[in-house]
Image: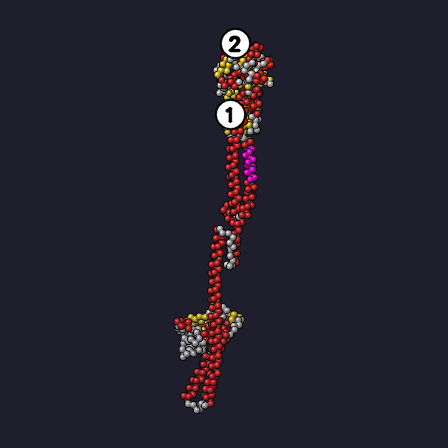
Amino acid sequence: MTRAYLRKLSIKQKLTMMMLLTIVAGVVLIGIFFMMYERVQMHDQLAHEVSTVSKVARAQLKVALIFDDIFTLQETANSLDFDETVDVVCIYNSDLELIARSFPGSASTSSCVDNPYQVQAGFNIDHHYYIEDIYSEDAKVGTLLIRSNFSYVDKQIQSFFYMMLTALVIISSVSLLVALVLQKAVTQPIYSLAETATGIAENSDYTVRASKESDDEVGKMVDAFNSMLETIEQRNNELKGHKEELESKVEERTSELRAANQELEAFSYSVSHDLRSPLRAIDGFSQALLEDCSDQLDSVGRGYLERVRLASQRMGVLIDSMLRLSRVTRQEISLSKTNLSVMCDEIVQELCERNAARDIDIKIQPHMTAVCDARLIRIVFTNLIDNAWKYTRDQAAPVISVGCERGVFFVKDNGAGFDMRYADKLFGAFQRLHSKEEFEGTGVGLATVARVVRRHNGDIWAESKVNEGACFYFTLPV
Amino acid sequence: MGALLLAAFSVMSWPAQAESESQLTAAFIYNFTKYVLWPVDTEKAGGDLRVCITGESEQKVFTGLKGRPVRAFHLDVKFLKPQDNLDFCHILYFRSKPDTALLEQATARSILTISNYEQFIDQGGVIQLFEEKRRLRFNVNLIQAKAAELQISAKLLQLAGRVVK
């Protein structure tokens, strides 16, 4: 409870409380000490006063006692009433008979005892007895008994107590004021350090420094804090430098790469483009030679020319697909929601028209849709279905299925398949897993497909076993 | 008289049984010697301080004073006969009306004269004892005391009923 309360207090409040408690405890202790001392002193003083007064009266008392002068005895007894402290003055003769008494104080509460030797001389609980035997020429002529109370002492102690209370209030308030001013010297540096630390923690600004206001432990703390900040700032700067260096390096490399890519594409485009016209010339002149000068050629010559034409036509197809590949890379993507089932139906339709002889079971999942570039995705499906069509050529009951499962599109066939060992070569340009004699093709198709899928931020992979068909998967997250 | 005896009983500083007014008188005489100083020579000399008694008295009571110490003195008691000389007396007590010739003789010397007689201090005596409210008191003739070169303590004078100055 107390600890929880102390936890909530600020250092300033704790210091103030500590100082106040110390001051109060000090003043109270000093007050108690002085009150005890004062009490002892005043008791001694009382006893001394009573004895002094009675000594003064003793000579008078002696002569009055030996001449049995009641009047003078009474007068002397009355004269001993020096203030309210004295309760009773009793004078006894040599036979301990009470012969004179005086009640200066509270007569009602006390009276003279029958025998003065019955009482305990000195200090009692609330009163003091002074007893003196009076002698004349070695013979006892009487006894003096003075009973005093402590009302005066108590009054003095009471006033002392009030004085102490007043002093306590004044000293506490003055000290509190002084402490409030002086404690700033202690709390201010801590407070400003705490504020700086909080500010740094909130803003993560490590360039800020705590200001040193003293050379004490707090000052050392500020120094340590500042050197810590310096280290952090230095590290931060180093990290920032490294990051900038890395970024600029990445940018440099990226732009270098981009330039190289553009150069490469421009080169391949222009090469493909420029290769077409000589090729057309070769094909065209070979055809013209066959048509116009066939009578001058024998069957062997004509056969060679046919071969030249076939080769140049195949080269034309190759160049076309290379152009398409480079176009796929350069072309801007325009996205729209596309019905892929309809697209696949159209592609299959075209294939059936071109190869009416083949009887293939083609299953296309209906209502497949995707947000994509329709023209580029048509290239993907055309290539994949085309491949499936091609590689099921030797199958007795060929089956091709196109579908989509949990966002992954697939084109599956039960054709020749391929060896998974070469799966990484599948999507590279001009990479072929089957010879041209086995299955015709340029080796550019799957490279184009992979490039389109990647341009849609998608992924493409394939699963297959030799002679057990192949399945191509791809995603189109865009 | 009973009350006087009672008072005497209480005042007497020696353990003698109070028997009469004489006993009280004897006690007073002894107490007076404590507060009266004789001339320096006498005081220095010390020895006996003689109390002379005249007239009819209870001799036994006064004899009791014999040997009691006062300062450097010891009290001595002498019962005077009519033809006796006063030379060796320091205190002279007249039980009844004093003999004029004897008193005149005493006033010429340093003798403390004491009597119960009413006009004693007006006739040249130093201390006159009297009864008041059943207590024994005394008057003092300071002029005569000075003439007799006797010093009477102010404390004693304070207790006196009347002081002739």
Q: Which residues are magenta?
A: A154-167
Residue A59 is a magenta residue: no
x then y, percent, for residue A91: 54, 22
Along the line of sight, the residue nearer the viewer: A442 or B98: B98
> Dominant secondary structure of the magenta stretch?
helix
Q: Residue at x 48, y 20 (%)?
A: A138
Farthest bottom residue in view = A296
Labels 2 and 1 share a subunit = no
Q: Is residue A422 left or right of residue A126?
A: left
What's the chain of the residue with tag 1?
A
Q: Is residue A323 visible from the viewing direction of this image?
A: no
State the separation of the CA atoms marked 2 and 1.
Answer: 50 Å
What's the chain of the residue with tag 2?
B
* A112 vs B93: above or below: below
Q: Nearer the viewer, mark 2 or mark 1?
A: 2
x then y, percent, for residue A415: 42, 74
Q: Residue at x 54, y 32 (%)?
A: A153
Specify the amino acid type for callout 1: Ile
Q: Dot 1: what SS?
A: strand
Q: Residue at x 51, y 71 (%)?
A: A372
The residue that label 2 is drawn on is B84
How packed is label 2: few (under 14 Cα within 10 Å), some, or many (20 or more)?
Answer: few
- Number of labelled discs? 2
* A339 vs B37: above or below: below
The residue that label 1 is drawn on is A131
Rendered image coloring scheme: secondary structure
x then y, percent, for residue A403: 47, 70
Along the line of sight, the residue nearer the viewer: A37 or B141: B141
Residue A276 image label: none
